[in-house]
């Protein structure tokens, strides 16, 4: 019964979203949980609460996943985010929701994520969506990508990023920027204060390992 109720809540929220427009939703709602598995919680000013299918996510929420957990969320800017296990992900700003925002900004504190930010031609945001991490900033424009720490036991402060498809990604740290322009292009930042490594096309082993971290 609870599962059915959550599904109904999600369908109603998405109907309001698409039919009546974002103005019908509370101003601070950033998106909704569209899929969830295992121990997933949200931390905010109200404390820590478990997340379930259909629940809203708000600006300034921190999402935390446990061992073998997954979360998928649809954001109000059109971005779909999937989080892997042992991940902490922050919602800082949402284009069109946050005041005077020309893009969306998220934070990956630890763990791994996959995102898809598909936009119609001519409707790209003025500024790329950003995912800020402790070691680098990831800029995203109409792209599907994977990013995360400790891939193939590389270390908890080593960030890997790979473009899966789309318009382009950049990774910037220590005053240097690497542009990823084609599917399979990847780069690595080996800790705080380190520059991104030169662009390299990932092999199947590394690409499959990354995708497995966010597979259901």
Image (cartoon, grey):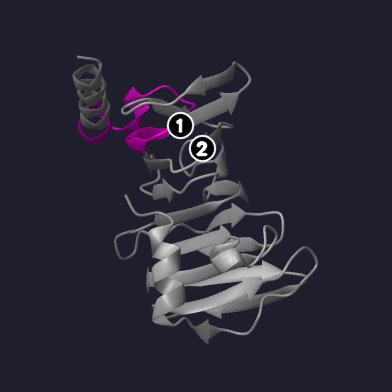
Quadrant that contains the N terminus: top left
Q: Is 23 covered by the magenta stretch?
A: yes
Q: Secondary structure at mark 1?
A: loop
Q: Residue 11 has which mark? A: none
Measured Cα–Cα span from mark 1 to mark 2 = 5 Å
Sequence order check, earlier mark of 1 and 2: 1
- Kindly identify which residue carries mark 2: 66
Q: Residue at x 42, y 22 (%)?
A: 26
Asked if one can make out residue 166 in the rendered structure from this viewpoint, the answer is: no
Q: Residue at x 22, y 17 (%)?
A: 5
Q: Position of residue 134 (x, y in %)?
A: 71, 54
The local crowd at label 1, few if under 14, some if 14 to 19, many if 20 or more residues have their Cα within 10 Å, is some
The answer to whether mark 1 and mark 2 are in CB contact below 8 A is: yes
Q: Residue at x 45, y 31 (%)?
A: 39
Q: Residue 39 has which mark? A: 1
Q: Position of residue 115 (x, y in %)?
A: 42, 55
Question: Between 143 and 198, which is closer to the camera in this rendering?
Answer: 198
């Amino acid at each position: 019964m609870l599962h059915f109720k959550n599904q109904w809540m999600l369908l109603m929220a998405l109907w309001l979203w698409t039919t009546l427009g974002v103005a019908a939703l509370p101003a601070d709602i950033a998106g909704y949980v569209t899929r969830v598995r295992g121990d997933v919680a949200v931390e905010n000013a109200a404390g820590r609460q478990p997340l379930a299918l259909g629940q809203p996510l708000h600006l300034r929420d921190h999402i935390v996943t446990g061992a073998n957990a997954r979360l998928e969320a649809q954001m109000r800017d059109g971005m779909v985010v999937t989080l892997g296990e042992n991940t902490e992900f922050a919602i800082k700003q949402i284009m069109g929701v946050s005041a005077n925002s020309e893009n969306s900004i998220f934070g990956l504190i630890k763990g791994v994520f996959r995102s898809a930010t598909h936009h119609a031609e001519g409707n790209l945001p003025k500024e790329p969506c950003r995912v800020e991490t402790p070691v680098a900033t990831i800029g995203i424009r109409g792209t599907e990508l994977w990013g995360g720490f400790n891939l193939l036991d590389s270390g908890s402060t080593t960030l890997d990023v790979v473009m899966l498809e789309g318009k382009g990604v950049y990774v910037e740290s220590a005053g240097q920027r690497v542009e990823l322009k084609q599917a399979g292009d990847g780069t690595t930042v080996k800790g705080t204060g380190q520059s991104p490594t030169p662009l390299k096309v990932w092999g199947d082993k590394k690409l499959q390992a990354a995708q497995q971290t966010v597979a259901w």
